Image: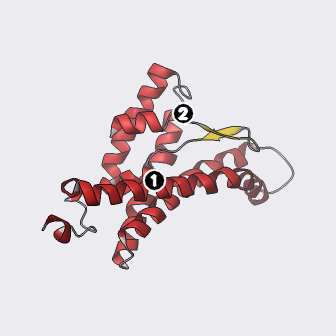
Amino acid sequence: MAAFVFIIAYISIPIPAAGTCSDPCGKGTFGILLSPVVRVLIASVALFKQALFLGHRGLIMPGANIVSMDLVGSFAGYGTFRIMRAFNVNLGTAAVMTGLMVDWATSLAPLAGPAVGIRGESPYLPRLMKIVIAFIPTEVSLGIIEGVSTAGMIVFLYKRRPNLLIKVPEINLEEVMV
């Protein structure tokens, strides 16, 4: 799983309006399969390896990414999936919503910082909204892609390798294991 995070988080998708980039991280899948604490540990190792061996984002960024991608993303995924399944939402839909919400929560978390750092006459909230609006075109599509890929992975595991989902209490494996 650390190798998966290492590779997928290295894919950068440019956000032209913001002059930066975003990346998929498989956060929805990990939010379902792992506890948030385990996800944070795995992704932290992968992010530090990227910084050390590939120079990806430098040595300062893993700390910010651990907070936004790992802490916020992991708990958002963990909570979203469990809440959706508690309301008996089917597995595929719950997985799509988990991937979508995790991606959006992860993207919104680090946007508060630049709004503080931008100097100007306008109050904080309008500056923050301008930054959020710049990210919307990429993050909406990236969230949808992350949601669909999360659902694809979870449904695939459910059908082909249900033994890997034994520790996920919200997934009823009894009908698959029979």
C-alpha span from label 1 to label 2: 26 Å
Residue picked out by circle 2:
61
Q: Nearer the viewer, residue 117 or 16?
A: 16
The residue depicted at 74 percent of the width and 58 percent of the height is: 129
Residue 88: x, y in percent? 35, 78
Q: Quadrant location of residue 43?
A: top left
Choose between 7 and 160: the one closer to the eye.
160
Badge 1 amino acid: Ser
Mark 1 surroundings: few (<14), some (14-19) or many (≥20) residues within 10 A: some
Circle count: 2
Classify mark 1: helix, strand or loop: helix
Vertical placement of residue 51 versus 29, above or below? above
Q: Look at the image and tell me whether residue 93 can be seen.
A: yes
Residue 22 image point, x, y percent = 60, 42
Q: Residue at coordinates 73% horizontally, 38% vertically from top-left?
A: 19
The residue where tag 1 is placed is 149
How many other residues sit within 10 Å of disc 2, few (<14), some (14-19) or many (≥20)?
few
Q: What residue is drawn where x is 66% and y is 50%?
A: 138
